Amino acid sequence: MTRRTGRRPGNPDTREAILDAARTAFAERGFDASSIRAIAAIAGVDPALVHHYFGSKDQLFLAAMNFPVDPGEMLPKVLAGDRDGLGERLVRTFLAVWDSPAGSAAQALLRSAVSNEWTARLLRDFVTTQMLRRVLDHLEVDPAQLPLRGSLVATQLIGLAMIRHIVRMEPVASADPETLVAAIGPTIQRYLTGPLPS
Amino acid sequence: MTRRTGRRPGNPDTREAILDAARTAFAERGFDASSIRAIAAIAGVDPALVHHYFGSKDQLFLAAMNFPVDPGEMLPKVLAGDRDGLGERLVRTFLAVWDSPAGSAAQALLRSAVSNEWTARLLRDFVTTQMLRRVLDHLEVDPAQLPLRGSLVATQLIGLAMIRHIVRMEPVASADPETLVAAIGPTIQRYLTGPLPS
DNA sequence: GTCTATATTCCGATAGAC
DNA sequence: GTCTATCGGAATATAGAC
């Protein structure tokens, strides 16, 4: 994977190679189905080295998820601008993250959360405290409705990620991002600021 | 969530007990994480009996998915009535199926599809040919847009199932069905018959 | 029909030599 | 820092005795 600058014998970026291999494996097959032995094979190192650097499989997963995806950096650009375009900007940013290097971490998290309660908790916490909370805090709506609005947004965004990146159902899987922004943006907008059943 | 029947061992419907246990296990943990040994333990039978009746784990999964959920029976009631209420009726029926005994099969299929390409194919085929196709065939819209409309509907419905039944994020996870029908119905309606980006 | 025994493979984790 | 060897466990699947 990583064939970075020619450091050779007793390679000190073995650790990065392992992290990179872990992200790839976790993204493609989820936490449970990714074995440390397989990750070591992808990285081209001995399986015992993985334990040496990261201690356990759980800690390796956490280290692999600790990616430079900083919602505090992306979201201000989503929140800036007119309120009516909030839905479209949120979908656009969401799709961009999934197509970026950080997308493999997101894919790994979503894929793992389905069959592993521990990682499902990680996903829930990330979505609620990192993604939704900052957006919801800027809305001028009944605060009592915020949790429902937030989890409705989650249904549409997680569903979009599932169909586009996990289940890969066409044509959404290969659609141009702006097509999806135009189609799904209004849905997010309505969940955020539109009328809701009391 | 399915109830275990607690069938008596050593009687002739051991086969049904195994099928029931398999649906429970596959729904709770997905295909890969459900071992034949665990299924046999739930059913209170010997693991070798599972092989005896079903041959392989794959065939057991197929047999467990072959549930009396007949879209040809549910969907006519969805399609009848005014076209403007189609979205809400579809969401209402979708939620009802997931809360019925067939819901465990649906949950098993969704949970397995995430980390197993073979079952992902089953899910794709079921959604497209059994669920969406019959609804889409009754729409009076540009036929060229039907695939996109269908997979947009899939993003919202699969996402709803993910948040409500798999990731279990509140308040959607515990919300009254009619609340979700009122909130999400208009989304489905717009994906089916509303304006779309060309 | 049911179960014992086993073949084969793989897992996470550890101990310790070089 | 790296690797060999191994422990303890669990998996699918098969062969064959009652």
Image (cartoon, coloured by chain):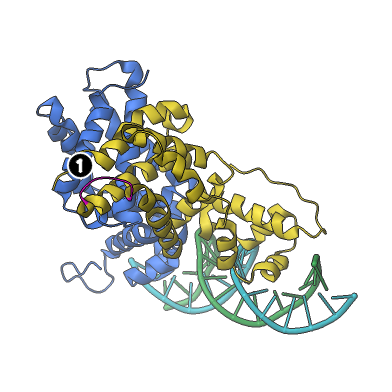
Chain colours: A blue, B yellow, C green, D cyan
- Disc 1 marks a residue whose amino acid type is Ala
Q: Position of residue B144 (x, y in %)?
A: 20, 54
Mark count: 1
Q: Main secondary structure of the magenta part?
A: loop
**What residue is rendered at 27% in x and 60% in y?**
A16
Q: Give the residue pinned by disc 1.
A: A183
Residue A56 in view of the camera: no
The furthest residue to the left: A81
Q: Is residue A74 above or below residue B26?
A: above
Residue B141 colored in magenta in the image: yes
Residue B22 in view of the camera: yes
Q: Which residues are magenta?
A: B137-142
Image quarter (top left, top right, bottom left or bottom right) of the N terminus of chain B: top right
**Callout 1: few (<14), some (14-19), or many (20+) C-alpha neighbours within 10 Å?**
many
Name the foreground residue: B191 vs A63: B191
Q: Secondary structure at mark 1?
A: helix
Name the foreground residue: A53 vs A182: A182
Q: Position of residue B70 (x, y in %)?
A: 52, 51
Q: Chain of mark 1?
A: A
Q: Position of residue B23 (x, y in %)?
A: 60, 53
Residue C9: image quadrant is: bottom right
